[in-house]
Image (cartoon, rainbow, N blue to C red):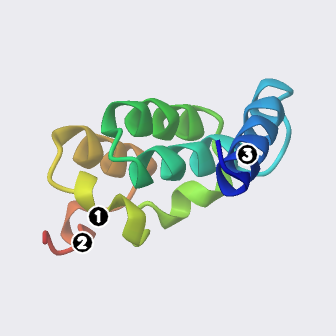
Amino acid sequence: MDDSQNEVNKHLEELFTKYNEGSSGSPAWFIALYYCTLNDYERAFEWLNKSYERHEVEMTWLREEPLLAPLRNDPRYVDLYEKVGFSSIGLPIKS
């Protein structure tokens, strides 16, 4: 494992720890984004739902976050989008 992967693992472990400790901030949100970068959309949705359940402030970026673009056509994204309280009129343009 190279140094950059070790650095990623260190930061990811910090996020998991913060999440498990119930820390403020948005650790679940950032874990979800990490899984999106890996194209692991199942885990991304798992962590987006955890972010929603904890009312993490970063969920307000659900509509605009570029890393989530691959999820926008998924019915789970639309469901989460509506649960957050965005109107369906405001759904981002599908790419």
Name which residue type carries label 3. Answer: Asn
- Residue 48, percent from left and from top: 48, 40
Of circles 2 and 1, which is in front?
1
Pointer 1 residue? 69
The one of 63 and 38 positioned closer to us in this rendering: 38
Position of residue 18 in the picture relative to residue 86 (left or right): right
Which quadrant of the structure image shows residue 66? Answer: bottom left
Pointer 2 residue? 92
Name which residue type carries label 2. Answer: Pro
Name which residue type carries label 1. Answer: Ala
Point out the tag, 3 or 2, that comes first from the N-terminus.
3
The one of 29 and 85 positioned closer to us in this rendering: 29
Are discs 2 and 1 less than 8 Å apart at CB? yes
Give the Cα separation between the discs numbered 3 and 1: 27 Å
Give the Cα separation between the discs numbered 2 and 1: 9 Å
Q: Is residue 54 visible?
A: yes
Point out the tag, 3 or 1, that comes first from the N-terminus.
3
Residue ranking furthest to the front: 2
Pointer 3 residue? 6
- Residue 71, percent from left and from top: 26, 52
- Residue 10, percent from left and from top: 79, 43
- Give me the residue at 46% from left, 44% from top: 35
